[in-house]
Image: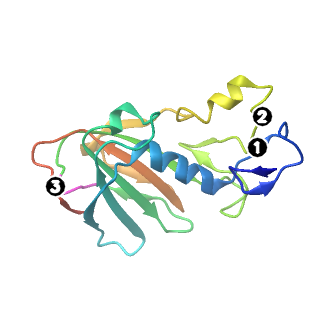
Amino acid sequence: LVNSVSSQQALSSTDPVIIRPSYWVNFLWKRALGRNVLNASSTNPDLRAYAFTGAPPSPSAAAECRVGLQLLLINLRREQSMRISELPVLASGNYSMWTLSPPAAGPFANQSMLNGELLPSKIDLISDRKSAAVLEEIPRPAVRRSVADGMVLPALSVSFICLSPSPDTATSILV
């Protein structure tokens, strides 16, 4: 048997599923980012910015991400958080954000943190129904703030951001 989440051999169908950090990136991608890719850029060499619109493909997509603009921001700084204080085309509105970051053990650990809380690294799909439910809904609530308050991206993090719809949202975004 092959463990479909981690692509590793499982001893039996009752073994717990091992979840690697890369799984959580894909998990959030499908629940927070739409399928339409927009032109996004960043003037900061330590920040990668990507923009999307449309409903995310997962039936368990976050409600706040089904309309409006979604951003994927990656902080490449190894030891410093990054503050995003201005989004030029989005001067007002609110956002919901989920941030994946490495645990204290560092970026090569076999676990991830979501909004500062450790995510499970094993799921027992057979005997623990509560544990299995983690694979449906996003396991941590979003950080919700006003765009005017800015955003803080932890070091070596991947942030999934859903912005409230705005009538003057452009298709080219400079972060």
Q: Residue at (69%, 24%) from the top-left corner?
A: 130
Which sits earlier in the primary sequence, circle 1 or circle 3?
Answer: 1
Quadrant of residue 84 within the rendered picture: bottom left
Q: Residue at (45%, 52%) from the top-left corner?
A: 159
Tell me if I can see residue 60 in this picture: yes
- Residue 103: where, in percent of width, then height? 66, 52
Kind of residue at disc 2: Asp
Kind of residue at disc 1: Val
Tell me if I can see residue 102 in this picture: no
Q: Which mark is residue 89?
A: 3
Is 146 situated left or right of 128 in this image? left
Front residue (pair 68, 117): 68
> Can you identify the residue that label 1 sits on?
17
Q: Secondary structure at mark 2?
A: loop
Q: How is the image coloured?
A: rainbow
- Residue 78: where, in percent of width, then height? 56, 68
Q: Secondary structure at mark 3?
A: loop
Kind of residue at disc 3: Val
Taking the magenta stretch, the answer to whether it contains residue 87 is: yes
